[in-house]
Image (spheres, grey):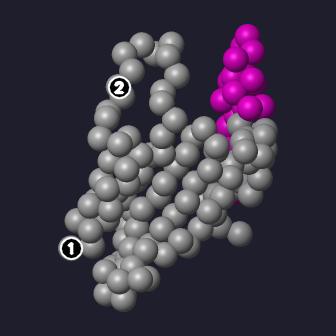
Amino acid sequence: MLVWFGLAVAGIVIVGLFGGKMNLWAGAELEPPAAVSIVPLQLGRESYGLAMVDAKSETIWIYEINSRAPAHSRLKLIAARSWHYDKLLEEYNSAQPKPREVKNIIEQLLKPGGSVPSFEANSPDITTLAEPNRK
């Protein structure tokens, strides 16, 4: 029920954005029309919503859809964020191995005569690689 409601809301928003006119572009060299992409989401076990992504303004919004709520509060904005500056980060909140470490391993492999580093069973590196989220 909630999924259908979410898809119906997404369809209404899409029709509202395009005004009933679908502008499909043929060539990859052409820039796509300015539009917002809408993706249905399952937020929890029995909680649904939708994400609206505006690639041009580099922004995402997450809405929760609650069909049991009063009509005036069925759609609730739960998160909004610009990723404009996020894409400039190279490492942030990354688990092991860090991107820099992966880069070093790949560079080692690409060198003439390079080989994959060997890990011993008791080595802390193998534990880190096998279970990156373990502290």
Residue 10 is one of the magenta-drawn residues: no
Residue 97 vs 50, above or below: the answer is above
Q: Picture quarter containing residue 133?
A: bottom right
Rendered residue at 62%/50% (across/down): 59
Q: CA distance from mark 1 to mark 2?
A: 31 Å
Q: Position of residue 49 (x, y in %)?
A: 40, 68
Kind of residue at badge 1: Met
Residue 1, numbered circle: 1
Rendered residue at 75%/24% (across/down): 108
Q: Which residue is mark 2?
A: 24
Q: Residue furthest front?
A: 19
Rendered residue at 29%/41% (across/down): 20
Q: Secondary structure at mark 2?
A: loop
User: Label 2 neighbourhood size at 10 Å, few (<14), some (14-19), many (20+)?
Assistant: few
Residue 80, numbered circle: none
User: Label 1 neighbourhood size at 10 Å, few (<14), some (14-19), many (20+)?
Assistant: few
* Relative depth, front residue between 119 and 50: 50
Residue range in magenta is 103-130
Residue 123 vs 104, above or below: the answer is below
Number of numbered markers: 2
Q: Position of residue 122 (x, y in %)?
A: 69, 57
